[in-house]
Image (cartoon, helix red, strand yellow):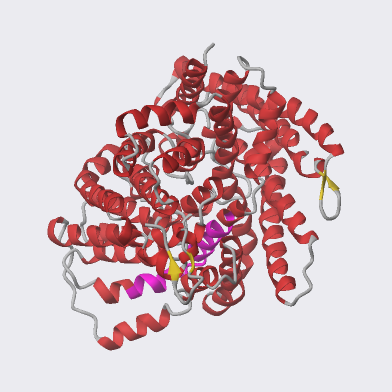
C-alpha cells in the first residue's frame, strides 16, 4: 500500500471510530495500529511512543493550569472576581453578558482551560441570566465564545502543547496570545452591547463599590502576576509557574478566603488527577499518530500540496493553514490536532520564513474558534448541556459571534507586528531577537 | 440548568452514573484508582515545589525530577483506566446516546471491543517494552526505565477489565441508562 493510501486509511479509521463513539485516545491509537500493520514498523515501538509522547517536562504545565482552575472554581473564590466584573461593567446594556465576557478575561489569566471557564460561568452567572430572562441559547453561545479566551490569554494549555511539540517559546506564545484574546473579549462586549439582549438595567456602581470589589478580588488577581511575572523574569518555567500558582492558592488563597474548603482538597486533587489524564491520553495517542504521519512522509505530502498553491508567500501559506485548521477544528479536538499536524506546520513555517511564535498564535487562535463550531465545538457542547438548551439552538445563536472570531483570525494573520509586539517588548529572545553586540537593545529578524 | 448536586456527583469517588454497566465488586478498584490519581498529581506538585525550592537555595535534589516524571506518567495512565470505568473520556461524538435497542447494543459493543483490542495491544507490547526497558536507565540515579513504562501494560489490563465489565453488563441490562439525557458529564479539552 502506498504512503498516501495509508495516510488516508489511518485518518479515516480514526475519524470513523471517533464519530462512532470510541474515545478519542483509543480511536487515534486504533488508526495508527491499523496503518502500522501495513508497514515494517513494529507495534512495540508504536506502543512505546504512547509513553514517550507524554514524557516531557513541559507538558507538566497542563495539570497545574487545570489544578489552578479547578481549585479556584471548587473553592468558590471566583465569586470575588465576578463581583469586580459586575462593579465595572454590570451597568452597561446587557449587563450580565458584559460581566460574562469581562470575568472570562480575568479567569483566562488564571486558568488555561476553556472547559473550566464554561463550568464556572454555567454554575455562577448563567442562573442569574436566566432570572433576568436572557435567552438561554444566547447565554450558552456567549459563555462558550467567551471561554475560548482561556486558551489565548496566558496561561493557555493549547500554547503549552504547541510550544512543547513544536519547540517554540511558550512564553512567546503566551504573550502573543494576549492581543487576539483581548480582541475577542472586546468584540464580544461590543456585540452584546449593540445586538445582545438588554437584560435588567442597573445603576452604575459607585467608586467606593468598585474599590471594595477590587479589594475583595485582589488576592485572586495576584495569580496572573505570579504566572506571567515568574515566566517573564526567568524565575520560573511555565510548569513551575503553574505549580507556584497552585501553591499560592493552596497556601494563601483558600486558607484566607475559604478555610472550610481545606477538608475538600483531597477530592479536588483526585478529580483534577483524573481530568488531566484525559487531554494527555489524547496527547499520547496523537504523538503516536504524528510519529506515523512523519514516517509516511505526510508532512512533505501536505506541505508540497500547500506550497503548490501558496508558493513561499507567508500570508497565503497561513491562509491555507487557517482554512485547514478551521475545518480540522470542526472535527478534531485542538490538542491532538496540534500534535498530529505539528510536523506539517513546522515544515510550512520554514517554507514561508514565518516567525514560529506568530504562526503558533495564528494556529491557536484558529483552533479556539473550533471550540464553538459544530459538530465538535467542545465549549459550546458543554455550555449548552450545563445551561440546559439544545445544542443546535445554541449553535444558531452563536453564528453572529463568529464574525468576532473571523475578524480576530484575519487580524492575527495580517498584522504580525501587532501580535508580536508584546513578545518583542517583554521576551525578545522568544521571537528570535538577540542582544545587540555593539550596545544596548536587541536585533530582531524582520 | 446544571446545579450544585450535578457538580458534586461528577466528582464522586465512585460514580453512580452508568451504574447498570458496573459490577459492584469493582467499585473499590475505581475508588482506588481515583485515590491514586490524587496521589499522583499531589506527588508531582510537591516534587516540583521542592525542586524549585532546593534549586533556589543552591542545593538541588536531582532525584526530584525523576520522581516528578514518574508521578506524571503514572497519573496519566492510571487516569486513562479510571476514565474508562467512569465513561469520562473525551469523545468526538456520542451518537449512541440517541439510539435504542439492538442498534445501540451493536454499536456500543463494537466501540468497547475497539477499546478492548487497543488495550490488549497496550498490555502485550507494553509488557515487551517494559522488559526491554530493564536494560535502559535514567540519570542520575540509574533507575530502570521500566519503573516509568511499566504502567502502560498495567493500565491496559485495567482498561480491558472495565471494557469487559461494560460489555457483559450492557448485554445483560441494556446499554441505555437514565443519564443519557442528563447533564452530569463534564468533558475536558
> Quadrant location of residue A246?
bottom right
Q: How many marks?
A: 0
Query: Could one spot residue B6 in this view of the protein?
Result: no
Query: Taking A255 as reference, is A133 left or right?
Result: left
Q: Quadrant of the N terminus of chain A?
A: top right
Locate residue B78 relative to residue B88 in the image: left or right.
Answer: right
Residue at point 39%, 54% (across, down)? A118
Residue at (29% x, 44% y) in the render: A315
Residue stretch rendered in magenta on the structure:
A63-84
Magenta stretch, main secondary structure, is helix
Residue located at (70% from left, 64% from top):
B46
How far from the left and from the top, in percent, is residue A433? 46, 62
Asked whether A406 or A410 is in front, the reply is: A410
Q: Is residue A416 above or below residue B77?
A: below
Q: Position of residue B130 (x, y in %)?
A: 80, 34
- Furthest toward the left, the residue is A194
Percent of width and height locating residue A210: 30, 82
Q: Is B29 colored magenta in this rendering?
A: no
In the current view of this chain or complex, which residue is farthest to the front? A438
Q: Quadrant of the C terminus of chain A?
A: bottom left
Vertical order, A76 against A162 (above or below): below
The answer to which of A45 and B182 lies nearer the viewer is A45
Name the one closer to the observer, A214 or A359: A359
Q: In which quarter of the view is residue A204 placed?
A: bottom left
Viewer-closest of A427 and A158? A427
Tell me if residue A312 can be seen. yes
The quadrant in which residue A331 appears is top left
Amino acid at each position: 500500500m502506498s504512503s498516501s493510501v495509508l495516510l488516508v486509511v489511518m485518518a479515516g479509521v480514526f475519524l470513523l471510530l471517533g464519530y462512532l463513539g470510541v474515545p478519542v485516545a483509543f480511536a487515534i491509537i486504533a488508526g495508527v495500529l491499523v496503518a502500522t500493520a501495513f508497514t515494517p514498523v513494529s507495534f512495540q515501538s508504536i506502543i512505546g511512543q504512547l509513553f514517550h509522547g507524554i514524557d516531557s517536562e513541559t507538558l507538566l504545565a497542563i495539570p497545574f493550569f487545570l489544578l489552578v482552575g479547578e481549585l479556584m472554581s471548587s473553592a468558590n473564590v471566583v465569586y470575588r472576581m465576578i463581583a469586580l466584573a459586575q462593579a465595572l461593567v454590570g451597568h452597561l446594556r446587557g449587563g450580565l453578558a458584559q460581566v460574562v465576557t469581562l470575568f472570562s478575561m480575568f479567569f483566562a489569566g488564571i486558568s488555561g482551560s476553556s472547559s473550566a471557564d464554561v463550568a464556572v460561568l454555567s454554575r455562577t452567572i448563567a442562573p442569574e441570566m436566566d432570572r433576568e430572562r436572557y435567552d438561554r441559547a444566547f447565554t450558552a453561545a456567549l459563555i462558550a465564545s467567551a471561554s475560548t479566551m482561556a486558551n489565548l490569554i496566558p496561561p493557555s494549555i493549547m500554547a503549552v502543547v504547541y510550544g512543547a511539540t513544536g519547540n517554540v517559546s511558550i512564553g512567546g506564545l503566551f504573550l502573543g496570545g494576549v492581543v487576539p484574546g483581548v480582541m475577542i473579549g472586546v468584540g464580544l462586549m461590543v456585540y452584546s452591547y449593540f445586538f445582545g439582549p438588554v437584560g435588567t438595567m442597573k445603576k452604575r456602581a459607585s467608586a467606593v463599590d468598585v474599590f471594595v470589589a477590587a479589594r475583595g478580588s485582589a488576592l485572586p488577581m495576584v495569580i496572573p502576576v505570579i504566572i506571567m511575572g515568574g515566566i517573564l523574569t526567568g524565575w520560573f518555567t511555565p510548569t513551575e509557574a503553574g505549580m507556584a500558582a497552585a501553591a499560592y492558592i493552596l497556601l494563601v488563597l483558600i486558607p484566607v478566603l475559604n478555610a472550610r474548603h481545606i477538608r475538600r482538597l483531597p477530592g479536588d486533587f483526585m478529580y483534577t488527577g483524573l481530568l488531566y489524564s484525559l487531554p494527555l491520553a489524547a496527547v499520547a495517542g496523537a504523538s503516536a499518530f504524528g510519529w506515523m504521519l512523519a514516517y509516511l512522509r505526510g508532512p512533505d505530502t501536505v506541505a508540497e500540496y500547500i506550497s503548490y498553491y501558496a508558493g513561499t508567500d507567508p500570508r497565503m501559506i497561513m491562509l491555507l493553514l487557517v482554512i485547514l485548521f478551521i475545518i480540522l477544528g470542526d472535527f478534531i479536538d485542538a490538542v491532538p490536532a496540534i500534535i498530529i499536524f505539528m510536523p506539517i506546520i513546522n515544515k510550512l513555517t520554514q517554507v514561508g520564513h514565518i516567525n514560529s511564535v506568530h504562526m503558533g498564535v495564528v494556529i491557536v487562535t484558529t483552533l479556539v474558534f473550533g471550540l464553538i463550531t459544530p459538530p465538535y465545538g467542545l465549549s459550546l457542547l458543554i455550555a449548552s448541556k450545563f445551561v440546559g438548551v439544545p445544542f443546535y439552538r445554541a449553535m444558531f445563536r452563536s453564528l453572529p459571534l463568529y464574525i468576532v472570531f473571523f475578524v480576530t483570525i484575519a487580524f492575527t494573520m495580517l498584522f504580525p507586528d501587532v501580535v508580536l509586539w508584546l513578545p518583542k517588548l517583554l521576551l525578545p529572545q522568544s521571537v528570535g531577537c538577540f542582544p545587540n553586540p555593539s550596545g544596548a537593545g536587541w536585533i530582531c529578524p524582520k | 440548568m446544571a446545579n450544585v448536586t450535578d457538580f458534586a456527583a461528577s466528582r464522586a469517588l465512585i460514580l453512580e452514573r452508568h451504574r447498570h454497566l458496573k459490577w459492584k465488586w469493582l467499585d473499590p478498584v475505581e475508588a482506588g484508582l481515583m485515590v491514586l490519581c490524587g496521589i499522583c498529581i499531589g506527588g508531582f506538585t510537591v516534587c516540583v515545589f521542592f525542586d524549585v525550592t532546593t534549586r533556589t537555595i543552591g542545593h538541588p535534589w536531582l532525584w526530584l525530577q525523576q520522581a516528578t516524571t514518574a508521578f506524571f506518567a503514572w497519573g496519566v495512565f492510571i487516569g486513562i483506566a479510571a476514565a474508562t470505568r467512569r465513561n469520562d473520556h473525551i469523545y468526538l461524538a456520542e451518537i449512541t446516546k440517541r439510539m435504542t435497542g439492538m442498534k445501540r447494543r451493536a454499536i456500543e459493543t463494537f466501540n468497547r471491543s475497539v477499546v478492548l483490542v487497543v488495550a490488549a495491544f497496550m498490555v502485550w507490547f507494553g509488557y515487551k517494552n517494559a522488559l526491554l526497558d530493564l536494560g535502559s536507565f535514567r540519570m542520575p540515579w540509574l533507575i530502570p526505565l521500566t519503573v516509568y513504562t511499566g504502567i502502560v501494560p498495567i493500565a491496559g489490563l485495567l482498561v480491558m477489565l472495565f471494557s469487559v465489565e461494560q460489555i457483559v453488563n450492557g448485554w445483560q441490562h441494556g446499554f441505555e441508562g437514565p443519564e443519557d439525557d442528563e447533564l452530569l458529564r463534564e468533558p475536558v479539552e
